[in-house]
Amino acid sequence: MQPTVIAPSILSADFARLGEEVDNVLAAGAEWVHFDVMDNHYVPNLTIGPLVCEALRKHGVTAPIDVHLMVQPVDRIVPDFAKAGASVISFHPEASAHVHRTIQLIKSLGCQAGLVLNPATPVDVLDYVLEDLDLVLLMSVNPGFGGQSFIPSALDKLKRVRGMIDRSGKSIRLEIDGGVKPDNIGEIAAAGADTFVAGSAIFGQRDYADVIDRMKGAVAAAR
Ligand SMILES: O=C(CO)[C@@H](O)[C@H](O)COP(=O)(O)O
Ligand SMILES: [Fe+2]
């Protein structure tokens, strides 16, 4: 299993002070920045694009930026995010006409590639592409909004995908996104996740270091 990564979702940050918010969560111990891109087409919400990613890099953010694309079509926007400084680019298979091609496109631009499975998306979609991926992202809420409740069936899915990754023998991260909090992150880690997105649980607290410490403590205890 890969070392633990906490990736605060900036969807729940104060956008009027975005650079400062990102600096603060990184100083508080977060390893990555989770960057939710919504297009009001694939999901019923509209957020941020490559310009904001580029602005964070210009602001001085050097941590990995984990771009979660909830857009359809996918391929057209991938080069813009690679140019803007994305580190990992993940997309939903339902939003790409050619999943294998999109993975190769992301990698050809020097980024790591991730595939995102919605709560009702079967794991079989990984069968022929798992070994090409750097990351599998399991959604534990339906995509489109922060602050939703964790869907419990994600735990069984994590265990299944953990088994698939371990059998592949490859260094592939297993990320979970949606409703992750200090009080459920332990069982999520025990089910096999190594990379944890949390938006409202972190940005909803005043003391980012305290909540990130409690999350890391619960993950370490569960591992
Ligand atoms: O991709 C998404 C939602 O579509 C997420 O990254 C959320 O932003 C996570 O927010 P919380 O559930 O942790 O509040
Ligand atoms: Fe996300």
Image: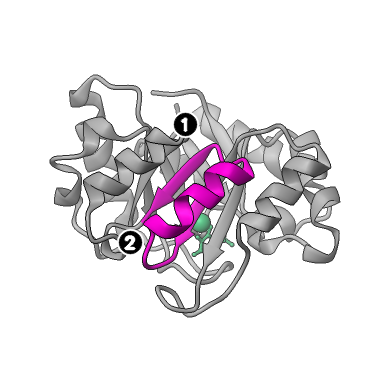
Q: Residues within 10 Å of mark 2 (few under 14, many from 20)?
A: some
Three-letter code, disc 1: Gly
According to the image, label 2 marks what residue?
118
Q: Is mark 2 on a helix, strand or loop?
A: loop
Quarter in which the C terminus is drawn: top left
In the rendered image, residue 26, in percent from the top left (x then y), is placed at 75, 37
The verdict on residue 82 being magenta is yes
The verdict on residue 17 being magenta is no
Would residue 124 be found to the left or right of residue 13 on screen?
left
Q: In which quarter of the image is residue 191?
A: top left
In the depicted structure, whether residue 3 falls above or below residue 139: above
In the rendered image, residue 74, in percent from the top left (x then y), is placed at 38, 59
Would residue 167 be found to the left or right of residue 56 on screen?
left
Who's the residue at 52% across and 68% down the image? 38
- Per the rendered image, the range of residues in magenta is 67-91
Look at the numbered disc 2 and say if its residue's Cβ is closer than 8 Å to ligand 1. no
Viewer-side residue, 80 vs 169: 80
Could you tell me how far apart the alpha carbons at marks 2 and 1 are, in whole angstroms?
A: 26 Å
Quarter of the image where ligand 1 sits: bottom right
Who's the residue at 40% across and 41% down the image? 106
Q: Looking at this rendering, what residue extends furthest in the top direction? A: 169
Three-letter code, disc 2: Asn
According to the image, label 1 marks what residue?
110
Q: Is residue 160 visible?
A: yes
- Considering only order in the chain, which callout, 1 or 2, is on the residue closer to the N terminus? 1
Callout 2–callout 1 Cβ contact below 8 Å: no
